[in-house]
Image: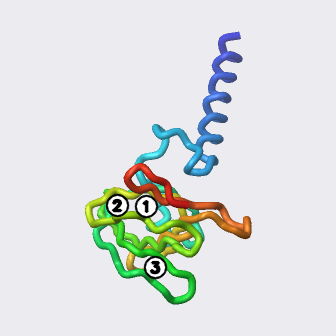
Amino acid sequence: MLKKVLIAIMALVGAYYAIEQSAPVSQRSPASQPANAELIRAIGERRTAYQVQGSGTVTRVLSDDNDGSRHQRFILKLESGQTLLVAHNIDLAPRINRLDAGDTVSFFGEYEWNDRGGVIHWTHHDPGAQHVGGWIEHNGKRYK
């Protein structure tokens, strides 16, 4: 009897961990995901078109990219020391107000690897409802 109970407990624990690891980053419990772990893994694996959530410190605010869809651009440094370009589409989402170097920003968007670390984009809703909506949080406000 004790053996059957132990097997059942082990099966439940195994199922919990399998479900937890297969859940999207945004749905995992905070204790199960070190800060930016999925993003750092995506950078190391040179992934593209990979949905991630993370946060970092703004190191530099760049000029807007006005070719085609307009994008507010800035460089974000992760606690790991890696840097990323964030390209936030301001034709589809509001501009981030008073963004300065030293500010903390959280995001949910799509990561694209490049030889400079990568780009985060799709930090907005998709008016065509074909892509997962993203966002940026700055000073307690969510921009999507």
Q: Residue at x 66, y 35 (%)?
A: 15
Local SS, label 1: helix
View extreme (bottom): residue? 67
Residue 102 appears left or right of 39: left
Residue that label 1 marks: 40
Q: Nearer the viewer, residue 75 or 41?
A: 75
On the image, which quarter does residue 58 sit in?
bottom left
Callout 3: 10 Å neighbours few (<14), some, many (20+)?
some
Q: Which amino acid, by three-letter code, is at mark 2? A: Leu
Q: Residue at x 29, y 63 (%)?
A: 81
Q: Which amino acid, by three-letter code, is at mark 3? A: Asn
Residue 78 marker: 2
Residue 58 appears left or right of 9: left
Q: CA distance from mark 1 to mark 2?
A: 9 Å
Callout 1: 10 Å neighbours few (<14), some, many (20+)?
some
Residue that label 3 marks: 114
Q: Quadrant of the C terminus?
A: bottom right
Expressed as whole percent of the image width and height from the top left, the position of residue 112 reads: 52, 73
Q: Which amino acid, by three-letter code, is at mark 1? A: Ile
Q: Quadrant of the N terminus?
A: top right
Q: Are marks 1 and 3 in contact (CB under 8 Å)?
A: no
Q: CA distance from mark 2 to mark 3?
A: 16 Å
Q: Residue at x 67, y 23 (%)?
A: 7
Q: Are marks 1 and 2 in contact (CB under 8 Å)?
A: yes
